[in-house]
Image (tube, grey):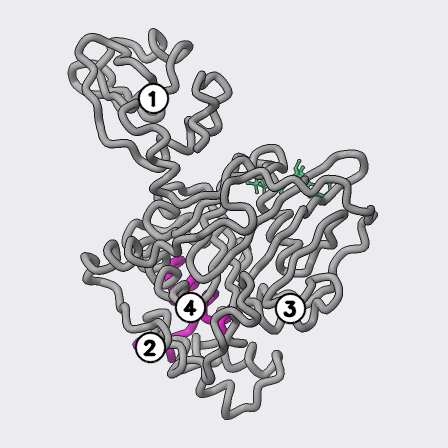
Amino acid sequence: MTPSTRDGPADESTDEPATDGSTGGDRSTGDDRSTGDDRSTERRAGDAIFRSDLGRAGRSAATGAERDPEPDGGPRVRIDGVGKRYGDQWALRGVSLDLDSGVLGLLGPNGAGKSTLMGILTTFTAPTEGTITVDGVDVREDPTAVRSRLGYLPQEFGVYPDLTAREFLEYLGALRGLSRATARERAVDLLSVVNLADAADRRLDTFSGGMTQRVGIAQALLADPDVLVVDEPTVGLDPTERARCRNVLADLARDRVVVLSTHIVSDVEATASDVAVLVDGRLRTHTDPETLVETVDGRVWECVVDDRATLAPDYLVTNTARRGDGRRVRVVADDPPTDDATPVDPTLEDAYLALLDDRDPNGGGRP
Ligand SMILES: Nc1ncnc2c1ncn2[C@@H]1O[C@H](COP(=O)(O)OP(=O)(O)OP(=O)(O)O)[C@@H](O)[C@H]1O
């Protein structure tokens, strides 16, 4: 099996001068930003199964010297008017985002352009228009320098099953030019960072899916990146492993940009300080999860109905569950959908689905 580390150059797709620099979101560029650290810390605090001794000190111990948080005072990652065209179809258009430390949850329906944006950020795909800089370095002008600042966990992450976790990381470290001693030290430290110190000398074919994903996060950290890009890291994991994985990401985001692309909205709700939603290649919103949730505040209801079909055409149903007394449905609507509907606390998923819902008279819940 081939490990999923990729070093290939950006593709040579047709490039065009920028034609559309629209920002598309309320946090796109230049806005005052909250990192949301308090929120992440609060959520982690109650979760005893996780280590939470990372951050600056943990990073130093695990990965060597610290870097200045934001060189030149600018955003760590600046995505400016980025677009990508395949043939005559735009996969991405006019996307602008400024990112600093924290988890950015990147959401969007299938085909929205998430992978395309991550491909451009990780230097594997050339943008048709616009620029992305990481610590001020342009991904197109110096992809090698950008890669040295960036760690990537792709969706399909392969390992050598007959190696131990430690051997695997040492091997990848050597491939990336680390000395044998440094690779060994880094492997041990990073396995500790992702809560796998006790399993360091176990063969990878004995690892669960969640453990393998955490090895994937460790390999992405080998170069001590300022920016970590992870693509659907929790798919297929059981709830405990999922929680472990996302908590590692939240801890790492204390002094890094973590871009988390996922369809699992609850993972974004649990970890992200920012959320960006792409729809049809455009940035529909960039805000913090709390602000997005507020867009449906007072508009989420639960009620029991005999048949969901009586509600579905008129209402945005965000969840439905069969109960002994009928179906309990969760609805986003301005007014109670039935006489006995009760208001409930909104979730990020309610707000996200409302944002995507073209029928929503309030503009899809856009903040
Ligand atoms: N290499 C390619 N050639 C042509 N079209 C492409 C290519 N890669 C992506 N696209 C198109 O670009 C659009 C965005 O795709 P992308 O994979 O970025 O979306 P996504 O949000 O990651 O979707 P998913 O959630 O399904 O992974 C889609 O219409 C897709 O068909």
Structural crowding at the residue carrying mark 3, measured as other residues with C-alpha within 10 Å and reported as few (<14), some (14–19) or many (≥20)? many
Relative image position of residue 341 (x, y in whole percent):
20, 15
Element at label 2:
helix
Per the model, the C-alpha gap separating discs 3 and 4 is 17 Å
Q: Which mark is residue 93?
A: none
Q: Which mark is residue 146?
A: 3
Per the model, the C-alpha gap separating discs 2 and 1 is 45 Å
Image depth: mark 4 or mark 1 in front: 4
Q: As drawn, which residue projects farthest toward the bottom?
A: 181
Per the model, the C-alpha gap separating discs 2 and 3 is 29 Å
Instruction: Answer yes or no: is residue 152 visible.
Output: no
Per the model, the C-alpha gap separating discs 2 and 4 is 22 Å
Looking at the rendering, the stretch of residues picked out in magenta corresponds to 197-221
Q: Is residue 72 magenta?
A: no
Tell me the residue that label 4 is attached to.
255
Tell me the residue that label 1 is attached to.
332
Tell me the residue that label 2 is attached to.
197
Question: Which amino acid type is marked by label 2?
Answer: Ala
Relative image position of residue 322 (x, y in whole percent):
24, 21
Q: Is residue 203 magenta?
A: yes
| Mark closer to the chain start, 4 or 1 | 4
